[in-house]
Amino acid sequence: MISEAYLPIAPEATGWKLPSSRKVAIVCLILTETSLFSIFVAGYVFYIGKSLTGPTPREVLDLPVLATIFLLSSSVTIVLAERAFNRDRVGLFKLCWFATIVLAGLFLTMTAVEWRKLIYHDGLTISTNLFGTTFYSLVGLHASHVIVGMCLLLLVFVFSLGGFVTIMHRERLQMISWYWHFVDAVWVVVLTVVYVIGR
Amino acid sequence: MASQEISQEITITPAGALGSSLVDRLHGLVITVDHKKLGLMYIGTALMFLVIAGLMAISIRLQLAIPVNTFLEPDVFNRFFTMHGTSMVFLVGMPLIAGLGNYLVPLMVGARDMAFPRMNAFGYWMFLFGGLLLYFSYLGAPGLAGHGSAPDVGWFAYAPLTGRAFSRGTSTDYWILSLLLTSVGSTVSAINVIVTAITLRCPGMNLMRMPLLVWLMLVTNFMILLALPALSAAQMMLLIDRYLGGHFFDTQAGGSAVIWQHFFWIFGHPEVYILIIPAFACVSEIVPVFSRKPIFGYPVMVGATAMIGLISVSVWAHHMFSVGMTSVGNTFFAISTFMVAVPTGIKIFNWLGTMYGGRIRFDLPMLFCIAFLFQFLIAGLTGMMLGVAPLNWQLTDSYFVVAHFHYTLVGGFLFGMFAGFYYWYPKAVGRLLDHRLGLCHFWLFVIGFHVCFDTMHFPGLLGMPRRIFTYDAGRGWETLNLVTTLGALCQAVAILLLVINIVRSARKGKLAGNDPWDAWTLEWTTSSPPPEYNFATPPIVRSRRPLWDLKHPEDPDWKYE
């Protein structure tokens, strides 16, 4: 009878350890998002210089130095926030976390200012030419990811004000920060393709 | 030495789980996060769409049975082949994979549920709403001149036919949005299966002790994560074109119709392997059990699957030889296409190696597996023919291509799924499927399949293009088309028998017991159907065949692995 059968404990069974579910899931999410961005980037690169009418990137795009500084430094502040959290320094954690949100907000504001200039001053909309179509799609896709990340950050911040974020949530915060680093890394690619190569 | 029991489950019916009224049961389905229920819901829904899309195929075949037929209007015909293709790939193939993965992966790795049960339910409902949205287009999408209108742009929706100028109304938007929804569902379920297989394995089950099905599901779901976004991205671009005046695929503004083809097939070709690998998975579990031998060349099988996954992302443009690529492009994609044959061939030889010298039991699951082997081989060979670029220029968009991919998807994918059906149905339901009805299903389907799709190659060779709604007499296509249609009808009868069998055996079938096939993987240690928690205590495994070790304590596998 099967029910009476016994198995000696496998040597591997003692100290059996597997990776954390959340981490694997976030890595998978980042993988599939990377694939999504790759197609948009491929589309952008394919259509560089193929517009039949103006304006061209060289005429209207400026290197977004300030926006880049804001977004990349937000990756630093979120690391500082995590570190403070792990050392149980709640005040510093909240401060750095809030700084991350502010920096993300500043980045989005810079994007808004840039788009306003492009639309009202240069007359470039998503339907003007191929450049407009690919530019707003790619940058917009990235910006929408920044917005999603900012919502997550805000949620954590609001909860932390109420004192609900405890050591239990350590891994969740870490996952948000991984996602945030990913969004930053995508920006580096977008910056290179759109503002350096494409110009 | 300390010892640990893999406990046998006692069937416990939780209060209210089998509510008396229909409303209670439906409510139970809506709120469930149990991987087994969700898996069966996926499979049940897929079968429903299989019947609907199958009826469309029958209508298409009836229309083509004789020359100058007027059974279907031309525009209805266009909608039917579009909905047939779209449904079969996204509403039958994908949910069957998801259902199989959902039901089996946690049981096979000795887990109590998927890693993220609620996300799992979310994935199912996204898929279902996507499917319903696609079919709602028949009512909800006023097209040209107020006709009701499902999408009619073909399942790969080539630009510029999908542009605003050529596809008026909203039917194409239904196609886009419903598939985006099902893609969300597929992505969520893929992440779930991967995480479950990687992080919820029971003690002792290291990667090289996982059942092959779990390995193959892992590869398939990784491919879903990598390939599906290409389709989603292309569809987002198409939406931008259609609603925001973008120019991605607008040739008049410098856009390219060809890049849609690239994006679509970057998704589309891996998709073919995404569908066939789960069929491989079923065959890899069933062939050893019914040959009474462990799988031949387990590590090679794993490696070959990973290789198929890798190579399959670099072959997409063999769907586009006739589009006018450079000769370098043609050569590259022809060679990479041939390279896929190597790992696939390795797999076929490994299955044969498993059967060689075994004590083969010709039960229904094994019959389907054997048919699968022959048919998939032929499908692969015609695939090689189509991979030869010059021959492809002759055969492209002809019925030869239609015959080839139906050979892979029906003769390969569907036969693999049927094998899995007959094999795991007793586990899921607790009763065996009726053997005689099953035999009728098998033989009718095999005969119907060959009459239909073997014959279909020839009108293709004679130059009959796909997607024509009728043809003139006197081209030599009449008899061939009539025979093809008869084969299709034969398959329809077989499917009807399957449905009858599923419904009847659920109530009247022979009781299965825990382990009707004398199998070796963990799902057979549970009761049939398994209790909601699967395993009362996490099992501990020491080899690839934990149940063999249990049944043969005097000669366990772990001594040799």
Image (cartoon, helix red, strand yellow):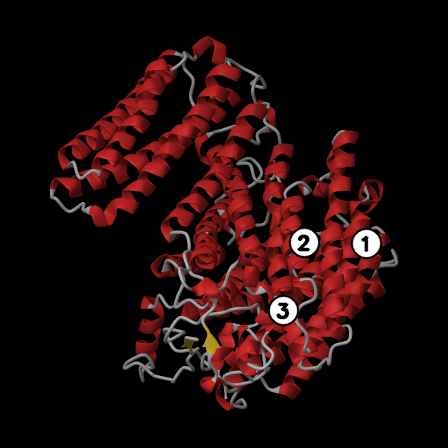
Query: What is the number of the mark on residue B460?
Result: 1
Which residue matches tag 3? Answer: B560
In the rendered image, residues at marks 1 and 2 fall on the same chain: yes
First in sequence: mark 1 vs mark 2: 2
Q: Marks 2/3: CA distance?
A: 23 Å
**Badge 1 element:** helix
Residue extending farthest left: A162
- Residues at marks 2 and 3 touching, judged by CB atoms closer than 8 Å: no
- Chain letter, disc 2 residue: B
Which residue matches tag 2? Answer: B304
The vertical placement of B534 against B117, above or below, is below
On the rendered image, what quadrant is the C terminus of chain B found in? Answer: bottom right
- Residue A20 image offset from top left, x and y in percent: 38, 52
Nearer-the-camera pick, B131 or B197: B197
Mark 3 burial class by Cα count in 10 Å: few <14, some 14-19, many 20+ = few
Badge 3 amino acid: Tyr
